[in-house]
Image (cartoon, rainbow, N blue to C red):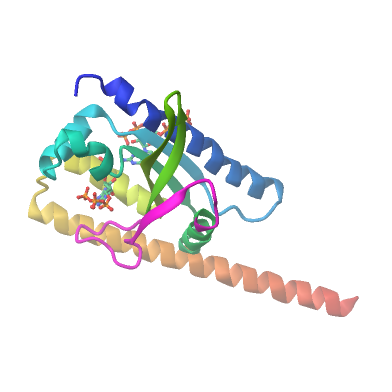
Amino acid sequence: MNNWDTMLSPYKQAVEELKVKLRGIREQYQKSSKHTPIEFVTGRVKPVSSILDKAKRKNIPLDRLEEEMQDLAGLRIVTQFVEDISTVVSLIRSRTDFVIVEERDYVIEQKESGYRSYHIVLRYPVETISGRRMILVELQIRTLAMNFWATIEHSLNYKYRGEIPEDIKLRLKRAAEAAFQLDEEVSQIRGEVREAQQIITRKQEQQH
Ligand code: 0O2
Ligand code: 0O2
């Protein structure tokens, strides 16, 4: 393939459009003074060097890339709490501007590495000068703690060229467990604070 820019151009457009749409959800929550389930949104088109590496690793012929590599366009939605993930998933499922192709729940079923995240693969319509194209886009939905772990593990993987020594792998798994505990603890704290607030509100109502 000699013209990557042309091939990736609809993917770039999809990433830009979806960043605007997903950040729009965040803004609507902020304006409504409700807790926003979206802390931040990032997006990227996979760099050509990573596309070539992954194609080699997964035996994907270059003329099958657009059908077989689901994350040429990738968006990441980061939440504060684990329970926000299901809110975001419901919001995504209720939309009519794209079609869901597949969902992978690595929050309930974490990967062997310790990786946790909720993945949704979409078919997103991009209007091009030669008509509408339905391209694949991958959404990753995860908490700040899951994102912290995945970002560091990802850069270590890069450093070790995918061959992280066994002792480091084990320590990373323990770190993933610590991130999981952190998610549990902050959700519990949040629950208790909410309960306390409800009790105070009820008492105030009874006094009036
Ligand atoms: P690294 O080492 O590659 O992670 P904006 O101006 O806000 O619209 P901005 O600030 O340039 O855009 O950020 P953008 O483009 O939204 O996000 C870029 C960073 O998010 C990149 O990190 C991407 O790697 C990362 N990212 C976002 N979504 C995904 C995704 O779905 N998959 C993967 N693998 N990465 C994602 P950096 O800074 O290039 O560093
Ligand atoms: P990038 O852009 O470098 O992040 P596979 O690619 O074979 O692992 P598959 O079936 O294509 O898996 O899709 P999967 O596993 O649902 O999602 C792949 C993406 O999820 C990866 O993209 C990562 O962004 C993220 N991911 C999956 N497992 C891990 C993990 O153990 N650690 C971290 N840090 N991220 C993970 P790529 O291809 O690595 O691309």
Residues drawn in magenta: 93-118
Give the residue displayed 15% in from the left and 55% down from the top.
169
Front position in the image: 114 or 4: 4
Is residue 56 rendered to the left or right of residue 112? left
Residue lying at the far bottom of the rendered structure: 206
Q: Is residue 117 magenta?
A: yes
Residue 128 in percent (x, y) is at 44, 27
For the point 11% across and 38% down, the residue is 56
- Residue 159 visible? The answer is no
Between 43 and 191, the one lying in front of the other is 43
Rendered-image quarter of ligand 1: top left
| Above/below status of 45 relative to 78 | above
**Looking at the picture, how far across and down is residue 85, in whole percent?**
47, 59
What residue lies at 40% left-to-right and 48% top-to-bottom? 122
Residue 119, compared with residue 186, is above or below; it is above
Q: Quadrant of the C terminus?
A: bottom right
Q: Position of residue 75 (x, y in %)?
A: 41, 42
Total tally of numbered discs in the picture: 0
Residue reaching furthest to the front:
130
Is residue 110 shown in magenta?
yes
Residue 204: quadrant of the picture: bottom right
Residue displayed at 59% across by 45% down: 26
Q: Chief secondary structure of the magenta span?
A: loop
Given residues 76 and 197, the one toward you in this image is 76
Against 192, is 180 above or below? above
Q: In the orientation shown, which residue stands out farthest toward the right?
A: 208
Picture quarter containing residue 108?
A: bottom left
Pinpoint residue 168: horizontal percent, then vertical percent: 14, 52
Residue 116 appears anywhere in the view:
yes
The N terminus appears in which quarter of the rendering?
top left
